[in-house]
Image: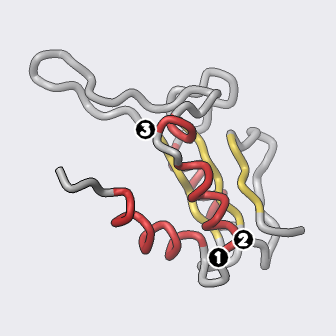
Amino acid sequence: RGPTVLINAHPTCQELPSDVPIVICHGDQDPIYKRPRAELEALIATGSPNMCFLYYSSTCGRLATGHTPRVGDQHNMASLVQFECLPRLMDSALCREGPELHMVRTWPERLTDQ
């Protein structure tokens, strides 16, 4: 019952424990655990206020050229490694002020000068 990063929430997971910091990571292209964003947001809402955060990797809409600029994560959650996001999400689960606040405070560090 400690800080938790849950990658790909299993469909049987319908409620989060109270008073536990939890980060849930899920992609909209997951072929194994298909869960719509609304369902994941409802799951997050079962946790304690200010102690839960949803990292949702979704597909962007198509451009006029037919190109999709960003495709959401599949079951392997590649964006967690590609963008070095997993360490930040782990740190956010450990942050006493809450995971969402940690992510908001640390995103400027990820910006480049370009």
Q: Residues within 10 Å of mark 1 (few under 14, many from 20)?
A: some
Q: At which x and y percent is residue 81?
A: 56, 37
Q: Residue at x 57, y 58 (%)?
A: 88
Q: Residue at x 69, y 43 (%)?
A: 7
Q: At which x and y percent is residue 19?
A: 78, 79
Q: Residue at x 60, y 83 (%)?
A: 97
Question: Which residue is the site of mark 1?
Answer: 95
Q: Cα distance, mark 3 to mark 1?
A: 25 Å
Q: Residues within 10 Å of mark 2 (few under 14, many from 20)?
A: many
| Front in this rendered view, residue 70 or 92 | 92
| Front in this rendered view, residue 108 or 58 | 108
Q: Does 1 sit left or right of 76 as displayed?
A: right
Please give the label number shown on residue 58.
Answer: 3
Tag 1 and tag 2, C-beta contact below 8 Å: yes
Tag 2 and tag 3, C-beta contact below 8 Å: no
Q: Quadrant of the N terminus?
A: bottom right
Tell which circle, 1 or 2, labels the residue nearer the N-terminal end.
Answer: 2
Q: Cα distance, mark 2 to mark 3?
A: 23 Å
Q: Looking at the image, which residue sits at the far right?
A: 1
Is disc 3 placed on a helix, strand or loop? loop
The amino acid type, in three-letter code, at marker 3 is Ser
Q: How many marks?
A: 3
Q: Does 24 sit left or right of 79 as displayed?
A: right
The amino acid type, in three-letter code, at marker 2 is Pro
Tell which circle, 3 or 1, labels the residue nearer the N-terminal end.
Answer: 3
Please give the label number shown on residue 52.
Answer: none
Please give the label number shown on residue 21.
Answer: 2
Q: Cα distance, mark 1 to mark 2?
A: 8 Å
Q: Residue at x 34, y 66 (%)?
A: 108
